Amino acid sequence: MWGGYTYGAYALKILKKLIAEKQVMPISAETIIKRRLRQAYTGGRNEYIQDPKPGARLYSIDFNLMYFNCLKTDFLMNKLFIKQTQQFEGAGFYYVRYEGHFKNYPVLYYYNKFTEHNYFCNGVGEGLFWYEELDLFMEEGGIIHKIYYMVGGGCGPNFKPFTELISSFKNRKIIKGLANNLYGRLAMKDYFHQYTLLDEEEFLLKGGCGLLGRWAKWYEYYICENLEYTTYDDYTDIAAAAALTSKARVKLYRLLKYLETRTQICLLNTDELICAGKEPELSLYKEQVKVQVTTLESFTKKKQMYISKRQLLGGGLTRPYKLINNMLL
C-alpha cells in the first residue's frame, strides 16, 4: 500500500492520466485478439526449487528495478491485428508449434486455465508467445516446427513517459512497487461478472422483467448474474502485460543460466533469486543486481508461498515446475 492505494492501482492512476494527456498511446484491440493474447499472459515466475544445505550461507540476488527497466524497452502499440504468417516478422506474439527437451530450467510456459497452473513442455507443444521469449527458446536449443499466425501492431517505447514520471519520486521502493505491480493491473479483464443475492419475490419480479441472466438457487435465495457484464473503469492492456512479464522472465532466465554451475539455486521470484553457498561472483551483472545476505526464515516464508508448484519425481528428487512430456495429446 502507498498513500491509500495499492501500488498497482496508483500506477494505473498515473498511466491513465498520461493517456488522457496524450503522452502515452493506448493499445486498442478487438475482443477476439484480447482473448487470444490472454493465452500468452502467465504473470511472473515464482518457484521453490530446493532447500539449502544445512548451515549454508544464503544470498538474495535482486534485480535493480527490473520491471521499471523492462517498461523502458519496446512494446506493441497502436491498433493490434492478427496476421497469418509462416515466418517471424519482428516484434509481436506468435502462435507456434514447438519442441524442446530441457534437463534443468525450461523456457516456455503453458498456462492451463482449468487447473490454474503453469506447465512446461518436454516434447511437442503449441502456444502463443512473445517473440523475445521465443528467441531465447531457440537459443537454448528449442525447435519451432510451425508458425500459424502472429499478433502485431507496430513497435515503440510507449511507456517511457510513465517511467520518467515515477522516477521523479526518488524513492527506490516506491518506483519498484509501482513498476512491479503495473502489469497485474494491465492484465485485468475488460469486465467482471456481477452477482446478486435475491429472495424469491425479487427473483420472480426481475425474472418476469427479463433482467436476469444465469442463476442458481441457494437455500431459499437465488444467486443471479446480471445479463450485462459490469465493465471496469480502468484501462487494460493485455498485450503490454504479457510482453512485460515475458521480458522480465528472459532477464531472470539469463541470470539463472549464468549462476546454475556456480552456486546452489534454491528459489526464484519474479525479480529475485535465492542461492546458497559462497557469495556469487557477479561482475558481469554488477550494474543490474543487488546481492545481500538473507536468512533461512526469509527463505522459508517464500518457500511456503511457492511449494504448491513442487512436483515429486521419485527418489527424493523434485522439480520446481510441472513438466509435461507432450502437450499435444
Image: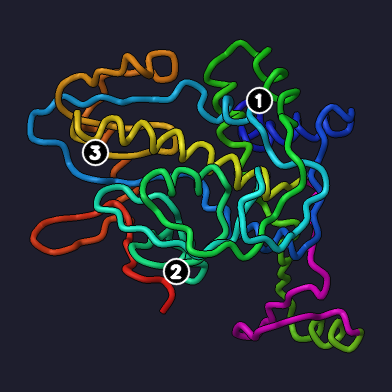
The spot of residue 94 in percent (x, y) is 61, 56
For label 1, count other residues whose C-alpha is less than 10 Å away and answer few (under 14), some (14-19) or many (20+).
few
Secondary structure under badge 2?
loop
Q: CA distance from mark 3 to mark 2?
A: 25 Å
Task: From the image, tell me which residue sits under label 1.
Answer: 3
Name which residue lies at 78% across and 51% down.
Answer: 80
Q: Earlier in the sequence, mark 1 or mark 3?
A: 1
The spot of residue 262 in percent (x, y) is 19, 28
Amino acid type at mark 2: Thr
Q: CA distance from mark 2 to mark 1?
A: 36 Å
Q: CA distance from mark 1 to mark 3?
A: 35 Å
Q: Is residue 129 left or right of residue 23?
A: left
Q: Which residue ends up furthest to the right in the rendered image? A: 209
Amino acid type at mark 3: Cys
Residue 69 higher or lower than 132, as above or below: above
Task: From the image, tell me which residue sits under label 3.
Answer: 266
Name which residue lies at 89% across and 84% down.
Answer: 210
Residue 160 higher or lower than 147, as above or below: above
- The numbered disc on residue 115 is 2
Span highlighted in magenta in the image: 210-234
Q: Nearer the viewer, residue 219 or 103?
A: 103
Q: Is residue 319 left or right of residue 110?
A: left
Q: Main secondary structure of the magenta part?
A: strand
Question: Is residue 222 one of those drawn in magenta?
Answer: yes
**Is residue 72 in view?**
yes
Of the two numbered discs 2 and 1 in the rendering, the one whose residue sits closer to the viewer: 2
